Image (cartoon, rainbow, N blue to C red):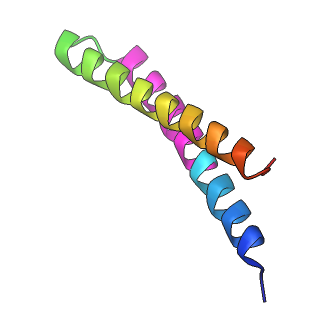
């Protein structure tokens, strides 16, 4: 049985992995597209993922999750 800390650790690391992947995916897609509005939308989505990563990292630090 996992402890609460282990469950939190796993959940945060999984969210971090997911957001990193999404940011990379949005960045790659925006580099491939020439349509200005779609390119801008993808860049904003990438930034949203990067903001989520920052929030996750700060929260992980508070809970001493490495």
Q: Quadrant of the N terminus?
A: bottom right
Please give left or right for residue 53 compared with residue 28 in the image: right
What span is colored magenta in the figure?
Answer: 17-32
Residue at left 73%, top 52%? Answer: 63
Query: Is 49 located above or below residue 56 in the figure?
Result: above
- Residue 55: % across, % down: 55, 37
Please give left or right for residue 59 compared with residue 25 in the image: right
Residue at left 63%, top 63%? Answer: 11
On whether residue 22 falls in the magenta region, the answer is: yes
Query: Is 37 located above or below residue 57 in the figure?
Result: above
Please give left or right for residue 1 compared with residue 43 in the image: right
Residue at left 48%, top 30%? Answer: 51
- Residue 27: % across, % down: 46, 23
Instruction: Please give the count of numbered marks on the rendered protein.
Output: 0
Location of residue 35 by image quarter: top left
Query: Is 3 located above or below residue 25 in the figure?
Result: below
Residue at left 64%, top 37%? Answer: 58
Q: Residue furthest bottom?
A: 1
User: Which residue is at the front of the view, 41 or 5?
Assistant: 5
User: Which residue is at the front of the view, 55 or 27?
Assistant: 55
On whether residue 30 falls in the magenta region, the answer is: yes
- Residue 40: % across, % down: 27, 15
Predominant SS of the magenta segment: helix
- Residue 12: % across, % down: 64, 55
User: Which residue is at the front of the view, 45 or 24?
Assistant: 45
Please give left or right for residue 56 compared with residue 62 in the image: left
């Amino acid at each position: 049985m996992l402890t609460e800390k282990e469950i939190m650790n796993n959940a945060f690391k999984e969210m971090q992995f997911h957001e990193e992947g999404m940011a990379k995916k949005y960045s790659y897609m925006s580099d491939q597209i020439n349509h200005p509005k779609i390119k801008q939308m993808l860049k904003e989505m990438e930034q949203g993922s990067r903001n989520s990563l920052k929030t996750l990292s700060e929260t992980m630090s508070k809970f001493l999750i490495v």
